[in-house]
Image (spheres, rainbow, N blue to C red):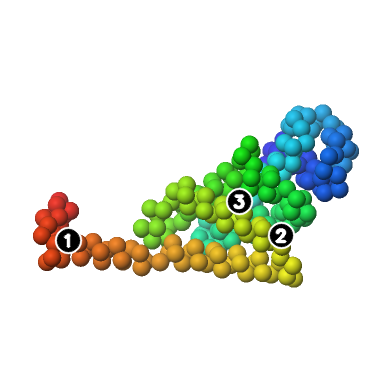
Amino acid sequence: MTKEIKEKIHIAKSGARLYTTNPYFSLRALADAADIEIDTIYKYFTNRRSILEFYYESIMIEYQESTQNIEGYLDFTLSEKLSNLALTLIDLMAEYKEFVRQTYKPFVVCNSRNQAFNQAFKVQLKIIYENDPHQSRLSTVFHTDLLYKAGLTNFHLLIRFWLNDESPANQKTMELVDKWTSFVQEVHYTAVIDKGFEFAKYIFYNSPLNPYGATSKNNSDE
């Protein structure tokens, strides 16, 4: 991680912390809270809103950085990688939970002007799905933007659940992540879909009730 990115993250986190006590803080107050020169803030950001929005982008950067330090990460299963994505992001947000509670919906879910977090999240889903060799052949057909949008929507719902989770150590959130990722893995790893497709293809080509069956089969063999 470059020095510039570290400085931007430091500013954004300081802004997130300050926001919970004063949503209309001045950049001078932020410079004092972050113990930096105000010129450093203006070097990277134009206003308070851009700083606060970058907070969410910064946790995606930190997540990407963290995966590089996990031994054997590339050998993780689909469920393990999805769990790591969700739980790492929640862990990074935990210290700033009140800020997230106040800003996640307007800054992330309903923010059409700045989609940096949403786009970065979908990119990570794309990487996770498309680099998993254990999925059934047919499930890879569904590796489209629709799948990644659905995954993003599920994450938004997960954050809403987490923000309202009053169980000890957010145990219910942990259980929800486990159930969700296990289900997704079961769907993508199962060979039932592949076998069903092969069965349907066999019936189509070999059924005596299909007058074009033999011709279709011969053409497919060619």
**In this rendering, the label closer to the viewer, 3 or 1:** 1
Mark on residue 163? 2
Mark on residue 140? none
**In this rendering, the label closer to the viewer, 2 or 1:** 2
Q: Which of marks 3 and 1 is nearer the N terminus?
A: 3
Residue 212 horizontal side relative to residue 128, left or right? left
* Quadrant in the picture for residue 42: top right
Residue 145, x across and y down, in percent: 47, 47
Instruction: Measure the C-alpha gap from mark 3 to mark 1.
Output: 48 Å
Instruction: Measure the C-alpha gap from mark 2 to mark 3.
Output: 28 Å
- In the rendered structure, which amino acid carries the disc numbered 2? Leu
Name the image quarter holding the N terminus: top right
Mark on residue 68? 3
* Residue drawn where x is 74% and y is 71% of the image: 168
User: Total number of numbered labels?
Assistant: 3
* Quadrant in the picture for residue 113: top right
- In the rendered structure, which amino acid carries the disc numbered 1? Tyr
Looking at the picture, tell me which residue is in the foreground, 143 or 43. 143
Mark on residue 205? 1
Secondary element at tag 2: helix
- In the rendered structure, which amino acid carries the disc numbered 3? Gln
Give yes or no for contact between labels 3 and 1 (Cβ–Cβ under 8 Å).
Answer: no
